[in-house]
């Protein structure tokens, strides 16, 4: 006879789903690697046609396609497959918001997360033996992969500003710009704005590529280097952008960076911060707290920080006003601080 503890135990299925969650990662990544979504966009409809285009077996392709249907990335009618709006927007090669490099980045991160117990024991990253060449290949892929998330969020952020606020933005400083996703959204919406990008030499070519692609390249200038040492100047900008930067910095370096940005902004200038922000009790959201663990794996002082912490840091740095903007395209509310 089962004990009362067994009879009253909750279902184990949520644990099973979490332990097997990586299957979803590899299914989507596999679909991208095999260009499944692109082949469907190009007119291939059944498993045999898609398998032939991908140089894959029909049995294997059918299993992958059906799993992607179950996950909501494809639709199925009889033996024919079609894209959903989500996969059409982000997973078709050549689309404006294609998540380029998504499969490769997912592979690297999965390997790193296998070392989580060691990172928890040590309290810091378990750095793998990646060469400088490997990292110079990884960073461009990472910033390309996250472009859609940041660009759609930046587009929504501009819309949250009043016409008066948009009109006063003439000079933008995009720090650690990556693909330029955050500043490009502003540049497209504010035709008179000019953007100064600060990022590493290995990343700046990606910024140039995306600025050209979105028709704003003539209003961009580039300062290649480590933003920790590049001089931002004083009273030079109307808007500064930190798009998912501070989680990698930690408290000490974040405070210093915020102080330097305050000096670089002109009177009444604003700072936009996009981040993964947990609630003040650090009990949720789960995705944000998991991202904090990701920082434990990858950054010596990195973490996710609460709104309460950001408010205090910004006050210490010299910012006088603070507001948040809820954004359906961002993992957490965006922060606007005014000098």
Image (cartoon, rainbow, N blue to C red):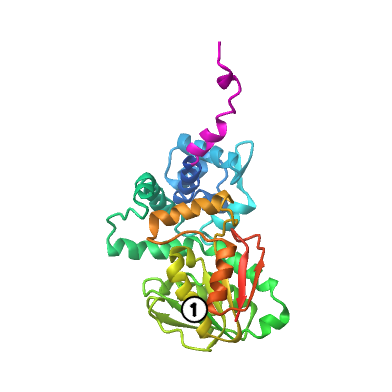
Task: Give the quadrant of residue 79.
Answer: top right
Front one among 92 and 291: 291
Range of magenta residues = 1-21
Q: Where is residue 91 in the image (x, y as percent from the top left)?
A: 54, 54
Please provide percent x and percent y for residue 179.
48, 70
Quarter of the image with the N terminus is: top right
Q: Which residue lies furthest to the right in this view?
A: 163
Seen from the viewer's position, the closer of residues 81 and 70 is 70
Looking at this view, is 33 or 330 the one in front?
Answer: 330
Give the answer, above or below, for where 110 lies relative to 190: above
Q: Position of residue 54 (x, y in %)?
A: 45, 47
Q: In this view, does 323 lie to the left or right of 221?
A: right
Residue 20 seen by the camera: no
* Left or right side of 225 for 58: right
Name the residue located 44 percent from the left edge and 64 percent from the top edge. Answer: 248
- Number of residues whose C-alpha sits closer than 10 Å to that of mark 1, classed few (under 14), some (14–19) or many (20 or more): some
Corner quadrant of residue 67: top right
Please tell me in which quadrant of the rendered image residue 273 appears. bottom right
Q: What residue is shown with label 1?
A: 259
Front-most of residues 188 and 277: 277
Task: Give the x, y percent position of residue 312.
Answer: 56, 70
* The C terminus - image quarter: bottom right
Q: In this view, does 252 lie above or below 270?
A: above
Q: Residue at x 46, y 65 (%)?
A: 143
């Amino acid at each position: 006879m089962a004990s009362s503890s067994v009879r009253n135990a909750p279902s184990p299925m949520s644990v099973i789903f979490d332990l097997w969650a990586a299957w979803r990662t590899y299914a989507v990544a596999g679909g991208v690697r095999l260009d499944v979504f692109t082949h469907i966009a190009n007119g291939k409809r059944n498993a045999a046609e898609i398998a032939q285009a991908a140089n894959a077996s029909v049995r294997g392709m059918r299993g992958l396609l059906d799993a992607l249907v179950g996950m909501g990335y494809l639709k199925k009618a009889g033996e024919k497959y079609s894209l959903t709006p989500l996969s059409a927007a982000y997973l078709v090669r050549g689309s404006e918001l294609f998540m380029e490099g998504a499969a490769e980045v997912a592979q690297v991160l999965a390997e790193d997360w296998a070392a989580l117990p060691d990172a928890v024991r040590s309290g810091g990253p378990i750095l793998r033996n990646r060469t400088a060449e490997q990292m110079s290949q990884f960073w461009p892929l990472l910033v390309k992969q996250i472009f859609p998330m940041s660009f759609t969020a930046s587009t929504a952020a501009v819309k949250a500003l009043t016409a008066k606020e948009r009109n006063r933005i003439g000079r933008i400083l995009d720090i650690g710009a990556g693909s330029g996703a955050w500043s490009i959204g502003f540049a497209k919406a504010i035709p008179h704005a000019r953007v100064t990008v600060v990022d590493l030499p290995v990343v700046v070519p990606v910024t140039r590529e995306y600025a050209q692609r979105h028709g704003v390249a003539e209003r961009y200038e580039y300062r290649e280097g480590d933003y920790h040492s590049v001089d931002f100047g004083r009273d030079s900008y109307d808007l500064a952008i930190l798009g998912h930067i501070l989680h990698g910095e930690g408290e000490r370096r974040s405070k210093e960076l915020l102080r330097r940005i305050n000096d670089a902004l002109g009177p009444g200038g604003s700072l936009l911060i996009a981040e993964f922000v947990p609630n003040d009790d650090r009990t949720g959201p789960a995705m944000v707290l998991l991202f904090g663990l990701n920082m434990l794996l990858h950054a010596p002082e990195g973490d996710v920080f609460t709104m309460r912490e950001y408010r205090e840091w910004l006050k210490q740095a010299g910012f006088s006003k603070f507001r948040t903007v809820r954004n359906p395209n961002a993992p957490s509310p965006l922060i606007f601080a005014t000098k």
